[in-house]
Amino acid sequence: MSLTIRDNLKRLLAPRHVAFVGGRSMARALKRCADGGYAGQMWLVNPQHDELEGVPCVRQISDLPCGPDAVFIATNRELTLACVRELAAKGAGGAICYASGFAETGAEGQALQQQLLEAAGDMALLGPNCYGLLDYLHSCALWPVAHGGKAVERGVAVLTQSGNFAYNLSMSDRSLPVAYMASVGNQAQLGVAELMDVLLDEPRVTAIGLHLEGLKNVPAFARAAHKALEQGIPVIVLKTGVSQIGAELALSHTSSLSGSDALYDALFARLGVIRVSGPVSFVETLKAAACGRLPSGNSLIALACSGGDAGLIADYAERNELRLPKLDAEQTAELAQVLPSYANLVNPLDFTTAIWGDGEALNRMLDSALRTEADAAMLVLDYPAQFTGERKECDLLLELYCQALVRHGKTGFVTSAFPELLPAHARERLHAQGVAALQGVEDGLAAWGRIAGYQANRQALLALGESALVPLCPQPLAGTGWLLNEWDSKQALRAFGLPVPNGVRSTVAQALEDAQRLGYPLVLKALSAELPHKTEAGAVALNLKDAVALTAALGNMANSIGAYAPGVAFDQVLLEPMASAPLAELIVGIKRENDFCLALVIGAGGVLVELLKDSRSLLLPTTEGAIRNALLSLRSTALLQGFRGRAPADLEALVAAIRAVADYACENAGQLLELDVNPLLVGAQGTTAVDALIRIGHA
């Protein structure tokens, strides 16, 4: 039975034998792999030498005794193509293509990359244009240069589109336990999503970190991230390409599609993906999750031996939505017996340096403090310099704290006020015992707050059901398409359940007669697909109370449109009853991002659209629960909730109206270019769309 790409990826991620194809740099890479502890069979393939750097060479891929599970190819792009074809024929598991010059360089490179993909067949292919794979679970370094990691029993998987980021991360003095580090490059075949999916089948992977410029396959990423959410494996992402220049750099670097940052935020929010702002927060948040023992909630019992540190804890805990529950009377009584009279018996607890180095007193303090309902514990501990000879007291406290966490069944972490004052030996000791070693109290509490927030958010997201829905990513549409006039737009949406005014499509000649049947006061609008911005054209007249007012409005409108758009005929009109004053006006629209997603945008509408810039985006399809949450998260949500004694909005009717717009968009995703309902009038009884615009494109 032939193996699938997924089967072969599993071989690549747990290789029994590996090969390196290339010259002296690959001989050195093979030796580094052996020095790192890899125990499987290894071969160096080079057609010109019998040995390099003391490593014997196999002349041809066809001479290998079997198809290796994993191969690192460090040749030029043309030879890479030939090697991939030979390896696939040999039955290799997976190949890593180091060479650049493929899709990131333009049309010629794109064509070559397509040939590479075809040559690979069902063999797993990482790259091209990538640094490779560091597998610290199996001590296998498929990597062209030195790296700073080491073997682990469990840890995080880091996937990045920058080889240099991976290199620097491996060299960083942060003691992040890394199980896998992969540079994904152009993602010709294996992308972030495919790697995530298989890595989530490895129980020793405790969290996934992504350094992204863009995603190649949003639906596949969504499926993998939902799988992570179901399994309780946090996904932490550092996304670049936020600025216009950053987005252009992403496209030229790995041919990735940046998409709009707001839509990435919407994607991450629906999937519970934790977004961070920089490399330090990325690493520290991963460390907070690396042991696999996540906090069950956001409350902390916090310990420090300094009032200054306690003050920092209090401030940063509040900033990161971490609760510090009060000590109970029994705890304070016990602590009063062991701590000096000047100790402040609160949470965070400054246990002072009076008991420093006293193992019995420290244990009594720890047992009293950790006998709490708080979800987790933290300790701030700054090591002095080695030359002081005073580190042994810190080591003692560290060991007693770890033992106390086990006695009390607590998850916990240790941090330092200054990042560099939690030395490597202390970090390694903590991680070996499943305790996160976070560097810097500000970054540490921020990281813990993100992980605690993830835990609280996870069940709510799963219950909402939106994360299980695969986002719609329709094919791009060319050109500007054509615009439906307001009547046709409203009728199309009305068929899906959107409430619209009970209006009449009429003509200038018929308007007075139709208005008499409809009744006054009413609204008059010119009906033309060539006037999408009717207000600017003077093509709207409000609150017309009688036939005289309507006659005057028709004349004024003819003059205004003639001046604004001389070539547009003014013959069709729309008459609608004048709506009563609403509680709020919203805009509901559909944003189509080519090669990314279709999104529902909900925001403050009417004249406030540009002024407030208060909106939320939801990828489609979505759920009514997600629509409700988006509405309640708007800054202007107070207008919907009985602001200043006014009646609250009919939220159920509002959600249903927005759902109708979403349903229309999903049904017409293949051809919908643009959709705006603005304003959507929100009342205490019901919701009405008083204007709508739909633009349809050509597939």
Image (tube, grey):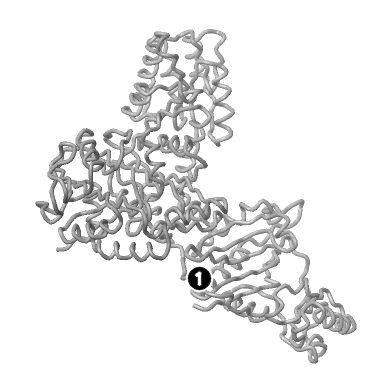
The residue pinned by badge 1 equals 666
**Does 161 appear above or below 223?**
above
- Left or right, 603 with reference to 449: right
Q: How many marks?
A: 1
Query: Mark 1 is on which residue type?
Result: Cys
Residue 606: horizontal and vertical position, in percent? Answer: 73, 64
Q: Report the front residue among 622 and 525.
A: 525
The answer to which of 483 and 146 lies nearer the viewer is 146
Residue appearing at x 88%, y 80% in the figure: 549
Residue 501: % across, % down? 70, 76
The 10 Å Cα crowd at callout 1, few under 14, some 14 to 19, many 20 or more, is: some
Q: In which quarter of the image is residue 650?
A: bottom right
Residue most toward the front?
Answer: 48
Q: Residue at x 23, y 48 (%)?
A: 22
With 186 as the anchor, is 677 left or right in this view?
right
The answer to whether 671 is drawn above or below residue 191 in the figure is below
Expressed as whole percent of the image width and height from the top left, the position of residue 71 reads: 22, 50
Question: Which residue shows up at 75% across the image and 79% down it?
Answer: 576
Tell me the SS state at disc 1: helix
Q: In this view, does 673 lie to the left or right of 139?
A: right
- Residue positioned 51% across, 73% down in the render: 477
